[in-house]
Structures are given as C-alpha cells and as structure tokens.
Image (cartoon, helix red, strand yellow):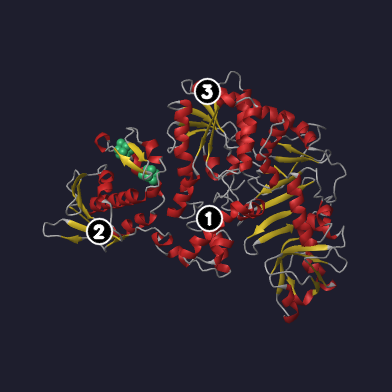
C-alpha cells in the first residue's frame, strides 16, 4: 500500500468478510465457522475498525432519518443488535465509514463548516435508501436526457434538474435520481438549492460516486442472516487466541529481559489498557501492580468503572492510584491558555510529573510497564518500537504487547474474555481520556456537550473569556479552533475558504495569552569600545530578583545587589548578563552566538521564576532532589548549594517548553546581526 499524507499507512488492513455467515473475519483467508473463503472489505486506511454499539446505531439512525426521512436508517440496515462496524478515516473532523453486511454503505461525518453531522451515502447505501423507501429528501431528479451523463459521473447542471429538495445547502451531500427514482450519482452541492430557480446554467452537484463505477453484479440488498457478536467471536476465536498467545509470550520474554524491574500495567480505563490488564493476569507467575493517574479531568464514569473493575478482579492490593488536584489544570490554563493538539502542556502537568511520583511511591526506582499502545492509532505509535522509554518519564520502561492489534482485535478479545469495559464506549466515545482533551474531534465535544452540560459549561465559560480577551474569531470557539496553537493546513484552508479571519495566528504568541509578563528584545547587537558585543531587551513589568537569583544560578555565577536592585551573572567564558528590578536586561561578551544563547536561557529562567505553576515536573527530573514546592506560594525553591547545574529542570519545565515559544523565534531572528 502506498503511503499518503491524508491516509497514513499504519499496517495492513486486516478486515475480511464471510458472506455465507455475514461475519467479519480478521486476518484469515477462510471463515472460522463455515470454512468458506472470505473477501477483503474495501475500507479507508488505516482500517482501525470498531463495533457500533446499540447507542451508536440509534444515534446514527436519528441523524440519517433526520436527513433522508424516517425509515432510511432501517432501509440501510442500521438496526439494533446487528454487527455493524465503524471505520474512522482521515478527515477535517470525525469521519466514520459505516460497514453493514460487509459493505461500506456510507460515511457519517461531522461537518465543521455546517457545524452539524452529515451522512454521505455510498452508491450501495443510497440504493438501499432511495430504491426501498419513498423518501426523496436530500435528492434531486434529473430529466431523461441527462440520465446517461449523470450515470457516467458528469456534473449535474442546472438545466437538467427537474426537481430538487430546496433545503439542500451548498457543501451538503445530495443524491441524483433518474425520473424513475433510480440512484445515478452522489456528490456535494455546489449551490444552495433554493437559488436554483434564479440560475439558468452552472454546476448544481459535483459527483463523488456514480453508477459508472458501480458493480452491477453486486448484491447490495440486506442479508437475511444477521448473526450476533457471539458468533463473530467464535468465527475469529483461533486468530484471537493466537494473538493472545503471542502477546503473553512477548510479556514473558520482556519480563525475563528486565528481571530486576518490578512490573506494572498502566491503566487508563480504556479498552487497550483493559486488554493489557487481562494479558498480564493471564501471564503465568507475573507479579504486577496496576497504576492509574486520575488527572482530575477524567469522566466520573471512568473513575467509577476503574474502581469497580479493580474490586471485581480482586486487584485492590495491587492497585496504585494518584489523584491530581483540579486546580493544577485550571491554574495552568489561566497562564498558558487552552491546551492544544500541538501544545499539550496539560499532559506534562497532569500525567507525566505525577506518573513519575506514582511509580516511585508504588514500585520503587524503576518499572517495566505494560502499556496499551497500538500502531494503528497514529503514525507516531506505528513508528514506535514495542519497547521504549519516554524521556519525560525516566523511571518507566514501556512495553506494548498489542502493537499489531487493530481496534477490532481488541474488541473481539474483550468479548471473548467477557471483560467489563468502560460504559462510555457505548455512549459514542471511541477513545477514553480527559474530557476536554484537545486531541478530541469536534464531534466528540458535541456528544460531551449533550451528555455533560454542566461540565461543558465550565470549559465553555473559560474559552469564551479567553476568546473575548484575545479578540478571537467566532469559529475559534464554534469550530473548536482553540484545539491548535498553529492550525494544520487542511483546517486553515477550510477556514480561509469561508472567510474566517486567522490574523490572530500571526500575532506574537505572547500577545495571544494574557500573561502579565512580556519580553521585548532590542534590534540586533551593538559593539562597545572593548570590541565586545551587547544584546539588550526588557520585560514589561518589575521582577522579583531575589527569587530569580536561584534560577540564574543553575547557569551562571551571580552577584545580587539588593540595594540597587540589580542581579548580575557571569559564565565560564566571561559573558556577563545583568538585569534590573524594573525588567531591563543586558548581555555582553566576545562571541555573539554565546551571548545570544545565554541571554535566551536566562530570559526563559525569568519566565520560569515568575510563572512557575508548581506542576512538580522539575522535581521529578532533579536527580539531586534539591527542588521543593513552597506551600505558601505553590512555587519551586531550589536548594542551590546542592545543585549540580545539570539543567534538567530548565529543559523539562512546561513554562519554558510550552509557555514561551515566541522566545525561540525572537532569538533566532535576532541572532543574525
Ligand atoms: S535539576 Fe539539575 S540544575 Fe535543576 S536544580 Fe536539580 S540539580 Fe540543579
Ligand atoms: S519550575 Fe518546576 S514546578 Fe514550576 S512550572 Fe517549571 S517544572 Fe513546574
């Protein structure tokens, strides 16, 4: 399979179908029940297919009936208790291909532009709906003369349309029918249907699918055999058992290779970690702890589910949980703004620091952790090894035994083992995590809005305040553009297409946030009489130099004159930096590169000193254990006489790493003159 930017290759598509039993078959060429040959199901990559639960079916049916008319979902085969699969594919937001009877009948997607759900049927789906019901919603009918052209995939032009659903909007999916009601093509509307009467020519509908490419021998009608998931498990039992055996062997082998490390299972309440937990339980003679960090942004359902599961599995004595105070997130959000997919300081604050502590408390110095990570989830995970270490969590060696499993392997295993899974999966969530996670799509937030109005209101209030204070466009909120610091191209293109002002992206990052502290670097170097170069800048507000002293001392020798309100620093190469309490800062030295580099680091230390959120990330990484949090201020203090100047605390601090990226830009720009 070719690699492509929009549809990443994350492994072979493993979904097949047995038409005799009407069942999904994983990996194998023959059905585990009847022994018949199976066929490949043509789905969009990466092919991480999951079951549609009854609530999913109901939710999708409401959308489809709302769009095409009552009875459409049933005609499609979207019926409770059937084996229906959802395949998430690459799109601006959520897009799930819907697989019924082993055929992709259409795609449910969340349309950012329309700020609503939309269902785009494929030819099979449209035929099931329009040729089995009297529904005509979201369709247009072309005259007899246009039929051969539309059948062949040509654009539907205004003069050829004899009837149209006037509610159709530009960009919406519509179905072109012959005068006899036969489905000819499906595509996107190029105009608002109500304007058709005013135009004499031009494109009305641009087809994506047409009869031209439709296999006329294909039996697209609903299958009479409708087996249950129990039968699906039976048909796949051997393959799932083989996956289990391989995973347990791999756990065993890894454990032997790390015999000195205590073993843990990182449990999140999600399906993948549930499978890992079960695999660990089934690994002979494996002693392990279950570790869970409650970020304070978990759904209550997840917490309750985990607690119940731990009790039901008799794992209470092996269970280590850490609860993070909710304030930690909100204080950081006040400082850094909403987290983004490309700006996930929240993970550092709510997960990484705490997990280091939890491991230390529960398992000692280091652990071998079994983690439910799969290659089909993302490019990064596909490229990840099965054994790896996260530089942010030095005391954890991670191992995933399910790297090659698709979501359907995971679900089949859960069904086979009759494991209790998180009830949120039945509420329309395909992933479990923090409820305001910026990695979620807008479609998921739509579900959360309805399901948890009070919780959502709290986040909405925060976003609205931030939006107002920073004069951000409406779509920053309604399209969920807050989920990125820098928009990805496809979202940017979409926004530009409809005229959303993205000027805010061009502003210097520091002005996006309402941080009290700003830094301005004066243009270029100047040279003094001694031949040394000088670089200067200023902060916009007075500084606490007494506090800053300790932070600068991890880089330079210092001299603090309290009376004059001046802090001076000098490095081993004689580069000097001085800062006054009013925020003016000057760096001087022989080498412009060194001056630039040192000034940048010390400027960042000013931000760290002033904006420390008490997240404790630096505590974890200080091997000398000389950093503590002062209870009165909830900020760090360094016992500097014992500091080894390793600077790990500087490298790891989220204030530096995520809070002030504008400083990188500022110093790289100025480093030229
Ligand atoms: S992490 Fe390193 S530089 Fe920072 S306080 Fe600890 S010993 Fe000093
Ligand atoms: S200095 Fe330490 S505690 Fe403060 S924000 Fe940075 S990493 Fe967190």
Of the pair 320 and 622, the residue shown nearer to us:
320
Q: Say whether residue 36 is left or right of residue 635.
A: right
Q: Say whether residue 87 is left or right of residue 164.
A: left
Label 2 or label 3, whichever lies nearer to me, is 2
Q: Say whether residue 353 is left or right of residue 22.
A: left
Quadrant of ligand 1 in image: top left
Q: Is residue 291 placed above or below 159 in the rendered structure?
A: above
Quadrant showing the N terminus: top right
Contact check, label 2 and label 3, Cβ < 8 Å:
no
The disc at residue 50 is none
Determine crowd level at label 3: few under 14, some 14-19, many 20+ residues with C-alpha closer than 10 A.
Answer: some
- Which callout, 3 or 1, points at the residue further toward the start of the chain? 3
Report the residue marked by disc 2.
582
Quadrant showing the C terminus: bottom left
Residue lying at 30% horizontally and 49% vertically, measured from the top left:
601
Residue lying at 78% horizontally and 42% vertically, measured from the top left:
83
**Distance of mark 3 from mark 1, alpha carbons?**
39 Å
Q: Quadrant of residue 642?
A: top left
The disc at residue 483 is 1
Report the residue marked by disc 3.
255
Q: Is residue 90 visible?
A: no
SS at badge 1: helix
SS at badge 3: helix
Q: Is residue 447 placed above or below 32 in the rendered structure?
A: below
Numbered marks: total: 3
Contact check, label 3 and label 1, Cβ < 8 Å:
no
């Amino acid at each position: 399979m070719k690699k492509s930017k929009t549809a990443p290759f994350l492994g072979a598509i493993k979904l097949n179908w047995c038409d005799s039993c009407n069942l999904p078959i994983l990996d194998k060429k023959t059905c585990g029940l009847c022994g018949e040959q199976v066929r490949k199901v043509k789905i969009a990559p990466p092919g991480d297919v999951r079951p549609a639960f009854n609530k999913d079916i109901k939710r999708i049916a409401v959308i489809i009936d709302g769009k095409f008319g009552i009875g459409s979902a049933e005609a499609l085969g979207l019926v409770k208790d059937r084996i229906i699969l959802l395949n998430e594919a690459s799109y601006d937001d959520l897009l799930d291909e819907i697989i019924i009877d082993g055929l992709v009948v259409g795609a449910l997607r969340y349309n950012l532009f329309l700020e609503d759900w939309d269902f785009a049927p494929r030819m099979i789906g449209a035929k099931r709906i329009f040729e089995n019901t009297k529904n005509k919603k979201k369709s247009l009918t072309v005259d007899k003369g246009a039929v051969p052209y539309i059948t062949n995939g040509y654009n539907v032009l205004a003069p050829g349309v004899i009837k149209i659903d006037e509610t159709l909007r530009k960009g919406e999916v519509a179905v072109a029918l012959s005068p006899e009601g036969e489905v000819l093509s499906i595509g996107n509307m190029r105009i608002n249907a109500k304007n058709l009467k005013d135009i004499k020519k031009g494109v009305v509908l641009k087809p994506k699918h047409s009869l031209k490419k439709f296999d006329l021998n294909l039996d697209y009608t609903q299958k009479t055999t409708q087996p249950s998931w129990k039968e699906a498990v039976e048909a796949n039992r051997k393959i799932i058992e083989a996956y289990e055996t391989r995973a347990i062997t791999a756990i065993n082998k890894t454990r032997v290779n790390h015999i000195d490390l205590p073993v843990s299972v990182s449990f999140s309440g999600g399906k993948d970690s549930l499978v890992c937990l079960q695999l660990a339980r089934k690994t002979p003679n494996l002693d392990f702890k279950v570790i869970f960090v409650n970020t304070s942004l978990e759904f209550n359902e997840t917490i309750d589910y985990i607690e119940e599961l731990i009790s039901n599995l008799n794992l209470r004595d092996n269970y280590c949980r850490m609860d993070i105070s909710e304030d930690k997130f909100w204080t950081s959000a006040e400082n850094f703004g909403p987290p983004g997919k490309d700006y996930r300081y929240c993970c550092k604050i709510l997960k990484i620091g705490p997990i280091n502590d939890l491991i230390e408390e529960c398992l000692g110095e280091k652990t071998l952790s079994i983690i439910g990570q799969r290659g089909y989830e993302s490019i990064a995970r596909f490229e990840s090894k099965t054994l790896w270490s996260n530089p942010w969590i030095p005391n954890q060696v991670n191992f995933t035994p399910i790297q090659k499993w698709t979501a359907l392997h995971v679900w089949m295993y859960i069904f086979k083992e009759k494991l209790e899974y998180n009830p949120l999966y039945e509420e329309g969530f395909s992933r479990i995590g923090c409820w305001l996670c910026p990695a979620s799509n807008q479609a998921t937030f739509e579900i959360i809005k309805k399901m948890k109005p009070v919780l959502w209101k709290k986040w909405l209030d925060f976003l609205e305040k931030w939006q107002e204070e920073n004069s951000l466009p409406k779509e920053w909120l309604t399209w969920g553009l807050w989920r990125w610091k820098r928009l990805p191209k496809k979202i940017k293109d979409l926004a530009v297409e409809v005229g959303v002002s993205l000027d805010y992206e061009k502003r210097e990052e520091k002005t996006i946030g309402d941080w009290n502290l700003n830094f301005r670097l004066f243009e270029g170097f100047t040279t003094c009489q001694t031949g040394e170069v000088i670089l200067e800048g200023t902060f916009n507000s007075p500084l606490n130099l007494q506090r800053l002293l300790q932070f600068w001392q991890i880089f330079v020798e210092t001299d603090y004159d309290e009376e004059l309100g001046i802090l001076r620093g000098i490095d081993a190469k004689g580069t000097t930096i001085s800062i006054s309490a009013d925020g003016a800062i000057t760096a001087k030295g022989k080498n412009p590169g060194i001056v630039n580099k040192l000034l940048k680091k010390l400027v960042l230390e000013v931000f760290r000193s002033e904006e420390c959120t008490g997240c404790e990330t630096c505590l974890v990484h200080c091997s000398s254990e000389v950093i503590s949090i002062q209870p009165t201020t909830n900020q760090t203090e360094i016992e500097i006489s014992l500091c080894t100047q390793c600077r790990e605390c500087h490298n790891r601090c989220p204030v530096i790493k995520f809070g002030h990226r504008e400083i990188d830009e500022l110093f790289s720009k100025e480093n030229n003159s």
